[in-house]
Image: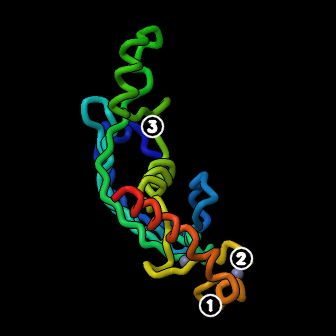
Amino acid sequence: MFLDVTELALQKARIRKSYAPGTLDFHSSEFRQVEPLEVRATAELLDNQIRIYGNLHTRVEMTCARCLDTVVEEISRDFDLYYRPATSLPREDEEARLNLDDTQIAFFEGDGLFLADVLAEQVNLALPMKAICSSDCRGLCPHCGANLNSEDCRCEKSGSDTRMAPLARLKQDWFKKQ
Ligand SMILES: [Zn+2]
Ligand SMILES: [Zn+2]
């Protein structure tokens, strides 16, 4: 869906769309959309800026930062965004450019912008920094790479000293400081 400024100047666009997995390009290999992305939004022209506000919802599959298993994360986001025409900014006005970088104002080029690009960006912003499959995920054995959630590797039994080493060192440091 293309949000065209000349059309938005005539009337608001009420958006209710569903994007099946694979139809949006997120420019990311960190996650995979696994459910339709549902969006409800309104787009309008306000002082020559395109304003888009509404919310989106979907689910994505990520990789657990500890055990590398797949984790499904729910993505829900409310947004209220303003896009200025790129021509509103004189190229030679470097100072204005720098100030705008600080405030992170977004721009659209030409006649408008694609809703798909807006949504892809919003999903990227809504992702958790780190996906963890469960708060008590035990991760991978640093020695043999076994997933400790599903198996007890041999390293754990024979080499308890290496597993405890960092903690022991920490305790030593703590005692030294006392
Ligand atoms: Zn995990
Ligand atoms: Zn191991």
Q: Nearer the viewer, residue 97 or 137?
A: 137
Circle nearer the viewer, 3 or 1: 1
Q: Nearer the viewer, residue 134 or 173?
A: 173
Asked if ligand 1 lies within 8 A of label 3, the reply is: no
Give the residue type that dot 2 points to: Gly
Q: Secondary structure at mark 1?
A: loop
Query: Do callouts 3 and 2 mark residues in contact (Cβ within 8 Å)?
Result: no
Please tell me which of labels 3 and 2 falls first in the chain.
3
Q: CA distance from mark 3 to mark 2?
A: 50 Å
Query: Do callouts 3 and 1 mark residues in contact (Cβ within 8 Å)?
Result: no
Q: Residues within 10 Å of mark 2 (few under 14, many from 20)?
A: few
The residue indicated by pointer 1 is 150
**Mark drawn on residue 112:** 3
Residue 68's x, y, as percent?
62, 73
* Picture quadrant where residue 162 is located: bottom right
**Mark drawn on residue 145:** 2
Q: Secondary structure at mark 3?
A: strand
